[in-house]
Amino acid sequence: MDPITLAIIALAVIVVAIIIIVIVRTSQFGIEYEALPHIELPEADGESVAQRIGLATQLRTISDVDESKIDPRPFEAFRDLIRTLYPQLEEKLSRELINRHALLFTWRGKDESLDPVCFMAHQDVVPAVEGEEGDWKHPPFAGELVDGYVWGRGVLDCKGSLICILEAVNNLVKEGFQPERTIYLAFGHDEENSGVFGAKQIAKTLKERGVKLSFLLDEGGTITTGQIKGIAGPVAFVGISEKGHLTLKLKAKVQGGHSSMPPATTAIGALSLAIAALDSNPFPQNLEVAQFVISHLGNEVPFATRMALANTWLFGGMARKQLAASPSTNALTRTTAVPTVIRAGDAENVMPGEAEALLNCRIFPGETVQDVYERVRELVEDDVVLVEPVYGDTIMDDHAWNPTAVADIESPQYNRLADLVMGAFPGVKVAPFMMSGATDARYYNDICQNAFRFTPFFLTKEEVDTVHGVDERLSFVNAGKAVGFYQLLIEEVSSLTADQEAEGREGSIEERIDLSKAEMSAIERMKEPLVVKPLDPTKRKALGLVKEPVDPAATAVDVPEAVEWQESEQYIDDDAPLVVKPLKKKPEA
């Protein structure tokens, strides 16, 4: 054969080999769980439960970063309401008041040698604009029952789940149920402001008593649709970890003056340029967590998406672009940094000498608070723009934390939670995921390896969007089902024997399901430092921060109507950093 023919044959063989590899890897991507028998939840009158949620909603339990500014009266009234609504619960369980307003209920189990379980929620809610300006269909603190819903601030986040937990425990007490394991109900009072005075103190108290928890459930993901492109069916997102958190202050400082004679650099202009540079140079993407989460959706994932995620060596660029185009999936691939507050100027003809912005960062596993701080400084700081901590003099405080530990999805505790979801809500897929937001559960890292974040509400995307927004509401159906769900789950996890806890599921995860190497390494990667592309190699070398760069090219229920997914027009190509006019440079040393 002539050389050209040989070359064509060789090329054809390579192409065929690539196609075979792609098809095989795609077919192996995704976990298909066996269908479970339908589980009948204990019946609960959803409207009656919603009425009690409405009563709780009427109490304006609003927290504050400054504990001295918290109005104690709504929290005192909330404790009185619990005592009034659930007298039998108050008789059977012991109640402690920790640090003024946090509540810890203890239901002693029959076997004190077994590690306890804990169910969590928080009493506080975010403020809501009232009256005509607020644009609520029903007043946010009236707790009205209209059109099959209870309306008001906090019914989803998270007085609804708190009342449902109390309802479930109260039902079990009335039935004469006695748990094998001790059960704690932990209700902090300042989760919306970092949980420093509430959940942190409860966790500290339990740790000082030598408590180790077998299982913990806090608020978190829900059952919903439309969160991931191409997934039409309902998915229950169970949080197994959380991103880290850091808020930084960007401060631009120049000589102020009259607006008729502006200098070359203004405070607002310099700050704007810094924000634009951060927006256009996002943190690098890492696909492994997204691969891990989406793999649990099995064949619900469109073939093209499975092909891209199973073969990132070939379609990595396409997968990155697709995931970055949706806010929810973009957050699964990188650290995010977004300006949330800007302050500057108070007169139209006066140039302010200072302008500042708050930059809220949610930190991807593998990176730390220190890593994020250094990267932001490298990108924007000079003699005009400074990057500073918001609280105190250091970046690591009660308002900043690294990504949390990852719960064990091979554990019998997760198994029981996931099985109950799939049994109680037929047709629902269960996906363990990393939460972008923060919960009080992070404070329990030292005393619990199996901390999960899930609320058993079946919500439409529209309902999900009301959290911290307008017209927050919870349906009577969801309220009733959640009580039954919590009731069965409490029975399940509190009755887990020591042998069952030790054994877990039979066999290793590799033996039970066929995962790719990328999927198997996703959780482990969460514990490793993330290698990032240097912005300024010279500066990084001088600081001793040089890292090897990563090549971006390498790496039967009623289902709510599916939400049409649309690609965002704000997709940013990581390989096209913003070219900006430099600000005034610091003098050479």
Image (cartoon, grey):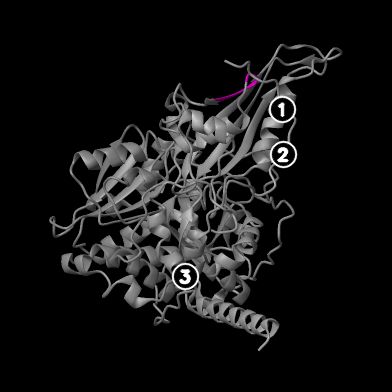
**Identity of the residue drawn at 36% across and 40% down:** 199
C-alpha span from label 2 to label 3: 43 Å
Element at label 1: loop
Mark 1 vs mark 3: in front: 1
Q: Amino acid at mark 3?
A: His
Element at label 2: helix
Q: Nearer the viewer, residue 4 or 224?
A: 4
Mark 2 vs mark 3: in front: 3
**Disc 1 marks which residue?**
582
For label 2, count other residues whose C-alpha is less than 10 Å away and answer few (under 14), some (14-19) or many (20+): few
- Relative placement, left or right, of 376 versus 568 is left
User: Residue 513: which quarter of the image?
Assistant: bottom left
**Disc 2 marks which residue?**
133
Tell me if residue 28 is in the magenta stretch: no
User: In which quadrant will I find the C terminus?
Assistant: top right
Magenta segment, principal secondary structure?
A: strand
C-alpha span from label 1 to label 3: 46 Å
Q: Amino acid at mark 1?
A: Pro
Q: Is residue 262 positioned above or below 207 on the image?
A: above
Q: Amino acid at mark 2?
A: Glu
Q: Is residue 224 positioned above or below 62 on the image?
A: below
**Disc 3 marks which residue?**
296
Mark positioned earlier in the residue sequence (1 or 2): 2
User: Residue 424: which quarter of the image?
Assistant: bottom left
Residue 42, position as x, y percentages in the image: 37, 71
Residue 266, position as x, y percentages in the image: 75, 20
